[in-house]
Image (cartoon, rainbow, N blue to C red):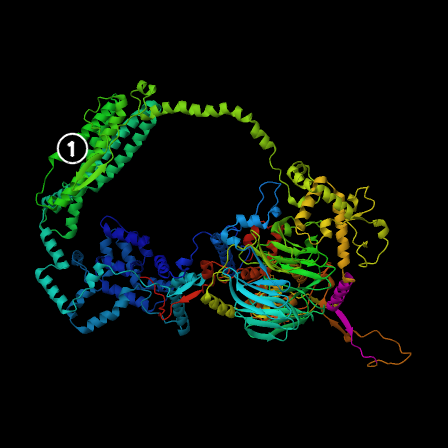
Amino acid sequence: MASSVDSLFVKAQNTTLPKSLRPTSPPPDNVPKHKHVKDLKLRTKLNRQAAHAARSKALVEDAELLLTNEAGKMQVETELERTWRIGQDDIVQSASQEAAKGRRELKLDGGPYRSRYSRNGRHLAIVGNMGHVATFDWQTGTMHAELQLQETCRDITFLQDQSFFAVAQKKYVFIYDRDGVELHRLKAHIEPTRLEFLPYHWLLASVGNNGFLKYQDTSTGHIVAEHRTKLGACHTLAQNKHNAVLHLGHSNGVVTLWTPNIPHPAVQILAHYGPVVGLSVDPSSGGRYMATSGQDGVVKVWDCRNWKGTVREWTTRGGGAELEWSARGALSVAVGGSVNVYTKPSIQTPHAPKAPPPLYLTHPIPHRPLTSVRFCPFQDILTIGHNAGLSSILVPGVGEPNFDSMEADPFENKKARREREVKGLLDKIQPDMITLDPDFVGALAPPTKLTTAVNDTHDIPFARLPRLERLRVQGKADETELVDDDDEDIADGDADKNAKPQSRMEKEKRKMRGKGKSVKRYLRKQRKNVIDPTAVAIRAKLEKQREEKRVAKAIENGSMEARKPSALDRFRRP
Amino acid sequence: MSEDLRVRLIGENEDDERMDSGDDEEIESDDAFDESDEEKYGFYFPSNDHDEEEDALSTSEDAPEALEELQDFISTLDSADDKKRKSNDVSTQSASKKRRLMQERTEAGDEGEFGVSVRGSTALKLDDLLAPLASSSALTTLKKSIKVLTSTSNKTKTLSAPLPQRAQERLDREAAYEQTKEEVDKWSATMKRIKQAEHLSFPLQAQSEGRVSNLELAAKFKPSNELESAVDNLLKSAQLRDQDIAGTEALKMAHLSVEEVAARRAELRMMRELAFRVDKKAKRIAKIKSKAYRRIRKKQRERLGGEEGDADVDVEDAEARLKAEVERARERATLRHKTTGKWAKAMQGREELDVDQRQAIGEMLERGEKLRRRIQGEMSGDESEENESDDEEQDVETIKQGAFEELAMLNASDVLSADIGSKSVFNMKFMRDAAERQIREADAAADDFLNEMGGVESESDDDACGDRTVTEGPSVQRVGGRVVYHPGTIPYTKPVDSHASETSSVTLQSADLVQDSPKSLNSISSPIISSPTQESNPWLVTSSSSGPSRKRSEVLVQKGSDALAKSTNKLKKRIAKGGEEKERIQDDAVLEIDADNVLTALEPASTPAVINTKHKLKGKGKEKPKNDSVAVQISPADADDSDEHSEVDEQERTLERKRKGGKGKGVTAFKQRELVTLAFAGDNVVQAFEDLKQSEIEADAPREVDTTLPGWGSWGGTGTKKFPPRPNLIKKIAGVEPSSRADYKKAHVIISEKRDKKAAKYLVKELPYPYTSHAQYARSMDIPVGAEWNTRVGFQRGTLPRVVKKMGTVIEPLVKAS
């Protein structure tokens, strides 16, 4: 029989993974084994999940080998050298010819300029305060559109790609196509000052002089949300690329965080004592750091996870600063007559004195005011908009060197652009999925914080408790590992409270329906006033077993001595 | 059992023994003898029929219970018959047992003295009596019906009553269940495996894929069209099909004797020999070579190692020998290697042999051959041992000599067996060319060997190989139309050393050893000599002492460092150029404000000069006593907005300040910035924010609302007593405790605690089934699934469904393997 079973095994061989997916190496050592889980099925499942997680992580780490491009960075050779002493001329000379093309000066009339790069860093849109709008491929130098709108223009942004752009004009927001043909006048956005486009949600957000934040879905055209900030005209808007939350800076020094879902700010921070001028969120660290600058010239770096306070703050000279984080976490501060760039480790480490972090690079610009700073994606280029046009400078090591062509491809052709547009529409995320925590989808709902004032002990029947609570009551919940949240501790406290000894009736009440030993059920069903010999016998037997168990336990505890066998035992009735 | 035994004993030597009367009394002969016994010992009882009658009687009134037996026993005791027997017993105690038995048993037969003679012949059986009726069918049916009765023992001659139906069915079911369970249990392992499998792809049992072999195709082949059938017919007529060929071969081989088989084999071997001669030669040369080397090596080792290992070698030899003996004994034990064996002789005598036998003969021949070779090999081994024992005194030269001789012999034998088989494939031109090439290669190998040995020798002894040929320069050979260039063998020349000549008989290795030692000595000693010079190198020392002392650039503003101050000569020079003018300008721009005077005025944000106590400096203690009045310094760069290099200048100034160690200036700079901050501050922003937060907290907090309507359920008007609100009318509104808020104790931030209803639909309200803790579930959701966050393999593995089924395939049930 054994042999037949073996051969059977050989025959039913398609019960394993396909050969191509089978792991080639044993799983890493630190994979949890879940030995404390008694349920074999669950344990197997958890083990498989853990192994898969470890494997896929290792695979991703392996794949990072393919990111061959390195971000260059200026480094000092001796202690006396300073990277900020190196001027643009030196950098241009030492840079390669192609990279040196990034250094440009656009001398334009028409007031201070603002600029915006498309997501793949290939196209640039500029807008002058007096109404000069242009979009072009800056690498090839081909102009897509150039408009003279003849009215005040405050901001510009590309939509999903270079084929559309929105301009915040004097009264409304207008959408133009690539060739500069006006497509839409968004009348809902009144006197807009700043624009942001959320690429994964296809939302165009604007904030204006009336203090309204409006979200418009550019794929359907509907207004998704209109939030009244109640804080007056707003001139500062930034998006957190990690979770698509919009950050607004107000004139009373408060920074507010908004999602389309809730009509009030999710978070309000008193960042400055004066108006907030500049605002930017670090894309390199998953939206963890936010930089703000006030009219008083103070620049602050905040930790967005717990809002415990500023990580770093210092004072610049020359008034309010425009801020922008690069993809690799360099912070550019355009203030007064110069642009300063600070790099990552020092800018994010807490530092008590209000001293500026070590400067990485600085570049003077004679044309005040400096109205916008933008890093070019996948390039080491910083574009500064100022009164006399735009200047692009080279900042080595701030751009992401490796691009993901599925995400944003600088070299995509017409067909690829179309494909990506369609795919982007299919993958569009609903606007109500924007929250502070972007990983919340599918997560277990956190226990509510709501409490009533006096009587806290709800008497929820067992059957109506949530499953986790039921497991806790039954003692089946796995309490060995806790999610390190504050909420979890509270839940733990509840569990302790529930762990108080229960009466037998209570236990009976909390028993899962449909479960139970047959003997006990039988006994339960027997009426107490009916004396049935079988029931009596079973009761006696159970009693005896219980007694034996008790004795065994007592012996084990040492409170009772085991009975020694005596010679008279042979006369005992079994 | 014992009774049986005894009876048999009695029966066997009935003449000598007597039976005890007591014994006899106790034994009921009917009981003691079974039916089978009866058959065995039937001839003791001439009247079997009577016996059977009695049996039938006893069983008819059968009572299995002991009591009834006892009664029976008593009744038999009482019967007259028994009494009579008893009296007989008593009277004829001295008589032989035979007679007594006869008396006892035979009632129907004649009890004369001639009755004894019946015993001599075979026992009379019922069948004998019924023999004339054998042809009648009635008898056969009767026999059949009786068969059951005759075959079973006394007690179960009647069939017992069947069990009640229910009980019977239950038993049947149990048995059937057992059977089915066993059958099903065979599958349990498989089912377990399927249940636990991570992935199933149906059909579970893969089709036997793989290509069909040619043989398989040929076996299945049936001529379908005309041509094929025609060819098949032809083949059949010529008897050239596979099975025919096998048949003819078998026919031919059937008559072969052992000698003919041997001849055939020899012929085959010759062919093989012709084909692989050169290979063999090359192998042989290699062997000779390695043997010679080995021997030389051994010599050397012996010389170096001395005599300490001898005893161990002996022991090992003995053990190995023992082992070999055992092996040989085993070989012998098979007895199939000789024609002298019984089996072999028998085989030889036979004319036609089947396949197995032929094979066996072949095997036998092979075995014999092998054994012979082994014997020879052992002999040669012995020879070599002898040789080696001789070699104890011999030199390396003799070893080499032997090797050369062997080579020469090989060559000679080659010449002898030059051309055999004039009409074979081997005589074709290309074959000959190839053979020639091979021969040449083998010869070259031999020559190489010769040269090498000679080369080694050249130092020690020149005479040893006179016949070796040393070629210099590239050798050109022409083989089969193509010119082949070999690099010429370069004569082995070693740098002549004084040690080598001393130890002429010492072989390569030892010479190397000796040569190497001085070199190694040199190499060790050289650094020792050179080291003091290195240490005394002044350049290195200075450079190492003034190594770059790294420090964090974070402390840029905090304190001046001496190391930095020392090394900023260059910077100084540069600044010194325009230093004086700058200083003058700075002096002009210095604005002195008496801080103590100003501190009393507390109107925030009124003038830039006002300093609020709230925003007082933290680093107050660091101020030097001389700075009684805090000087707010407005540097030229600050004043002049149009300065292009403002940041660079600022940084440079910071460096300079640090170099000077002027702390006071840094402090003053802070002061000035505080002023700027205040200048731009809004009105009461902090207070407004605190109020906002407070109101938010209160709005969120749990509270109670008294819903009593005045005048309802109570008396109103003046002079009525005010009752406390009734608890059932107090409405409790759930809320968030201020202490459990996320922004608890964070004054500068308000985090909304209101529930995000729209996002709540994306949350899971209950812990999903298999998981027993939040952490388990969270971890399962942690792994991103999409292709954007995974590699291709990781993505495929993560999204592989548990069951995969190929479209359109029929899923057959599992089949147990045969």
From the viewer's perspective, tell me whether residue A548 is left or right of residue B618. left
Nearer-the-camera pick, A189 or B148: A189
Identify residue type, mark 1.
Answer: Asn
Nearer-the-camera pick, B575 or A263: B575
Question: Please, which chain is the residue tagged with disc 1 on?
Answer: B
From the viewer's perspective, tell me whether residue B20 is left or right of residue A490. left
Can you see residue A217?
A: no
> Is residue B480 positioned above or below B305 on the image?
below
Crowding around mark 1 (Cα neighbors within 10 Å: few <14, some 14 to 19, many 20+) is some
* B695 falls in the magenta region: yes
Nearer-the-camera pick, B674 or B143: B674
Which x, y percent locates residue B522?
43, 23
Nearer-the-camera pick, A418 or B341: A418
Q: What is the magenta range?
A: B686-710
Which x, y percent locates residue A442?
57, 66
In the displayed orientation, state which residue is furthest to the right: B719
Which x, y percent locates residue A332?
62, 55
From the viewer's perspective, tell me whether residue A133 is left or right of residue A310. left
Classify residue A415 by image quadrant: bottom left
> Is residue A224 positioned above or below B608 on the image?
below
* A334 falls in the magenta region: no
Counting every numbered tag in the picture gives 1
Q: What SS does tag 1 mark?
A: helix
Classify residue B1 by image quadrant: bottom left
Which x, y percent locates residue A282?
61, 57
What is the magenta segment's predominant secondary structure? helix
Determine the residue positioned at 14% across, 34% down.
Answer: B413
Give the labeled residue for mark 1.
Answer: B411
> Is residue A224 positioned above or below A268 on the image?
below
The quadrant of the image that shows the C terminus of chain B is: bottom left
Can you see residue A123?
A: yes
